[in-house]
Amino acid sequence: MQSYTIVIADDHPLVRAGVRAAFAREERYQVIGEACRRYEAFELVQSLQPDLLILDLVMDVSPTAEWLRQCQQVCPRLKILILSSHTDARYIVTLRTEPVAGFVLKEEASECLVQAVRTLEAGSTWYSQRVTQLILQYAEEQRRKHHYRLTPREQQVFDLMVQGQDNAGIARQLEVSIHTVRRCATLIYQKAGFRNRVEAILRTPRHDT
């Protein structure tokens, strides 16, 4: 069985050790490199060609969207999973570029990290519920700032999303299909200006169960 290879980039040794330990019992996953500087992470991605880069947002130099794209240019199959304690929604939104397939907070259990990687490997995306809430709150701020209008149904869906309801729960409460909820959510994000990878959050399995 071919391994799913991972590079860890974080400037805290204890964090790297914790991530490494999370995958120690997972035969499928192999940590093949570690970096504590951004330039080291880029060099490892270029030389080792991993499947996944688990990346902290705040190292010696915080990664930019352009740097993330450069990583994928030198390793086309690369996916990036952000692992961070950073919760500034404005910054999170700027990193919603194509290579970024997920975002997990460091405060979450190691099992969440492993599940996120499994989801990314399967071709989907993973955004923690807390991150989703931050993005939704930012969307609400943008809605108030720019005065864009939601339809009555979109407003119902948005209000329940802000309350933390998942897609299935919203569908049950409003007595509509999950497809309808997804469609409304997509329109909400578009009106808020999130035009790239809008469905990254919506396709996360935990939001559909």
Image (cartoon, rainbow, N blue to C red):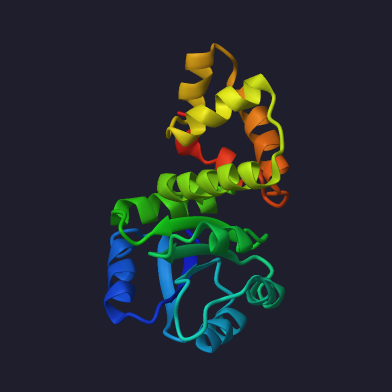
In this orientation, which residue lies closer to the viewer: 156 or 44? Answer: 156
Residue at horizontal 63 percent and vertical 47 percent from the top: 142
Residue 171 at x, y percent in the picture: 53, 19
Residue 188 at x, y percent in the picture: 66, 36
In this orientation, which residue lies closer to the viewer: 137 or 13? Answer: 137
Residue 199 at x, y percent in the picture: 64, 42
- Whether residue 203 is visible, yes or no, is no
Image: 78 above or below 138: below
Query: Which image quadrant: the C terminus?
Result: top left
Q: Is residue 53 left or right of residue 94?
A: left
Residue at horizontal 69 percent and vertical 69 percent from the top: 76
Q: Is residue 112 left or right of residue 183?
A: left
Disc tally is: 0
In this orientation, which residue lies closer to the viewer: 107 or 39? Answer: 107
Q: Quadrant of residue 79?
A: bottom right
Image: 209 above or below 62: above
Residue at horizontal 44 percent and vertical 60 percent from the top: 87
Residue at horizontal 28 percent and vertical 54 percent from the top: 109
Image: 150 above or below 49: above
